[in-house]
Amino acid sequence: MRKEYGKVLRKACDEGMAAAGMGWERQALKSLWLMPGERAYARRLSDSLTGWCVLSPHAERDSFTIDIGWSRLGRFPELGMRPSALVAEVDFGRDECWVRLGELATGEDICWEVGTGVARSMADLQAMVTPLDAATARARVLPCVEGALAALQAHGEAFLAEAARHGAE
């Protein structure tokens, strides 16, 4: 993701995740399970369950995805891959799990696309490397962040609440 988009994306996600209705807190952690450029957010769902959310900007394209999951082990989930399960196959009894928010929201593994990210001509390639002003970057990124956060509220919160209910049984 180009740096102008990444800067706006990180700031907007930090603010949106911390908003009163969401209550997610950014976690400054180093983990083998996080890639460079990713941001982790956490929220206590119950005494024994922590919900996790990871913002993953794409390294090469102007897009991002969000993974959500949980851990009953008091740590950032340490699973070999993210997502660790297809939504249709989630076992809420697992100690740790990751799913892709886009799949929860749409049934497909989607990314939020800020730009086309595809150069079809020399002019497209030039436009992709030309620096953007902050206002243009914000105008392109904010609708995507708003869509992702709306998906988190509409689909991710219910998913994590189900995990918390299952753990209380």
Image (cartoon, helix red, strand yellow):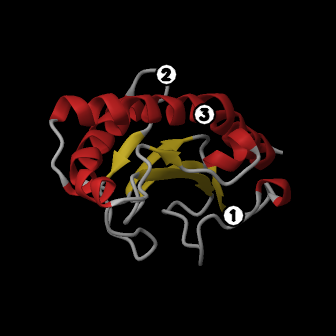
The one nearer the camera, 125 or 78, is 125
> Which quarter of the figure is the C terminus placed in?
top right
Gap between marks 3 and 2, in whole Å? 13 Å
The one nearer the camera, 62 or 94, is 62
Q: Which mark is residue 95?
A: 1
Residue 109 visible in the shown view: yes
Q: Quadrant of residue 120?
A: bottom left
From the top left corner, tell me how far across and down residue 155 is, in percent. 68, 35
**Mark 1 / mark 3, whichever is N-terminal:** 1
Rendered position, 108 above or below 137: below
Q: Could you classify mark 2 by the number of other residues whose Cα lies within 10 Å: few (under 14), some (14-19), or many (20 or more)?
A: few
> Which quarter of the figure is the N terminus placed in?
bottom left
Could you tell whether 30 is left or right of 153 in the image? left
From the top left corner, tell me how far across and down residue 85 is, in percent. 73, 64
From the top left corner, tell me how far across and down residue 100 is, in percent. 63, 54
Element assignment for label 1? loop
Gap between marks 1 and 3, in whole Å? 24 Å
Q: Could you classify mark 3 by the number of other residues whose Cα lies within 10 Å: few (under 14), some (14-19), or many (20 or more)?
A: some
What residue sits right under mark 3 in the picture? Answer: 151
Across the whole image, how many numbered discs are drawn on residues?
Answer: 3
**Which amino acid, by three-letter code, is at mark 1?**
Asp
**Which amino acid, by three-letter code, is at mark 3?**
Ala
What residue sits right under mark 2 in the picture? Answer: 21
